[in-house]
Amino acid sequence: MTFDSDQPRANPASVADDLEEAGCPPAAKADLPRIERAVREILFAVGEDPDREGLRETPARVARMYAEMFSGLFEDPRVHLKKFFTEKYDEVVLVRDISFNSMCEHHMLPFMGKAHIGYLPDGRVVGLSKIARVVEAVARRPQVQERMTEMVADLLMEELQARGVTVVIEAVHSCMAIRGVRKPGSMCVTSAMKGAFRNNPSTRAEIMTLIYGDRR
């Protein structure tokens, strides 16, 4: 399965709007007591006793886990791209196999995998670790893989003013593996091609070869 943006370049307001809709005020924090109360209610609802020994600490554990998994809601991923370096380098920059974990917003079950991110600089390059931090910030919120792919690509295009950006994400979804159709091992692949990578077939072919090599 692949997903490919129909837009050659990001709408300047699109990422800001997406972040505002998905995010929370910067000063906000996860409400741990409220999560604990909700988890207790879920345990009651499924027929369990949240006061038995094995479950007494479960609501608190789940609350801490959600605070960690959804920490991206309280972080603006753009901050990681604000510091860049001026370089004349104009060839592909690629970071492969960036591992991530996220939470499917449809079933509140995790999906995890790897992101491959490449861009063509136009005078601006960014530290490689910053790209991984952007992936982390975007992943750690209730998410769908398609939106995550687009959001990361748009952020890089907007903040780095790159000539082109490619984002390819490969992930395994536990909502498909352990429930419903129950197909463990199935891989979802999404892609977003921006600028030169979308408009120039040879440039697009180059980045896909760099990402996959002989694995295709």
Image (cartoon, rainbow, N blue to C red):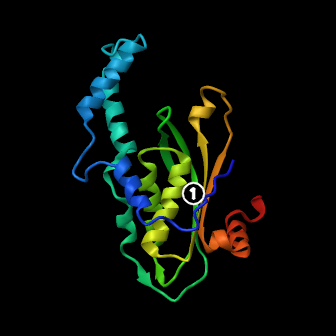
Residue nearest the observer in this picture, 123 or 56? 123
For image coordinates 35% across by 25% down, the residue present is 58
Q: Residue farthest to the bottom?
A: 88
Q: From the image, which quarter does the C terminus lie in?
A: bottom right
Q: Vertically, is 6 above or below 182?
A: below
The residue indicated by pointer 1 is: 115
For image coordinates 36% across by 31% down, the residue present is 62
Choose top left, top right, bottom left or bottom right for residue 61: top left
Q: Check disc 1 and report its element: helix, strand or loop.
A: strand
**For residue 77, side relative to residue 107 (left or right):** left
Q: Vertically, is 124 above or below 11?
A: below
For image coordinates 34% across by 49% down, the residue present is 23
Q: Residue farthest to the left?
A: 27
Task: Give the class, few, some or many, for how many residues have Cα within 10 Å of label 1's Cα (few <14, many ≥20).
Answer: many
For image coordinates 62% across by 32% down, the residue present is 177
| Percent x, y of residue 133 | 43, 61
**For residue 210, side relative to residue 20 (left or right):** right
| Percent x, y of residue 47 | 41, 10
| Percent x, y of residue 201 | 73, 72
**For residue 37, side relative to residue 149 (left or right):** left
Residue nearest the observer in this picture, 92 or 203? 203
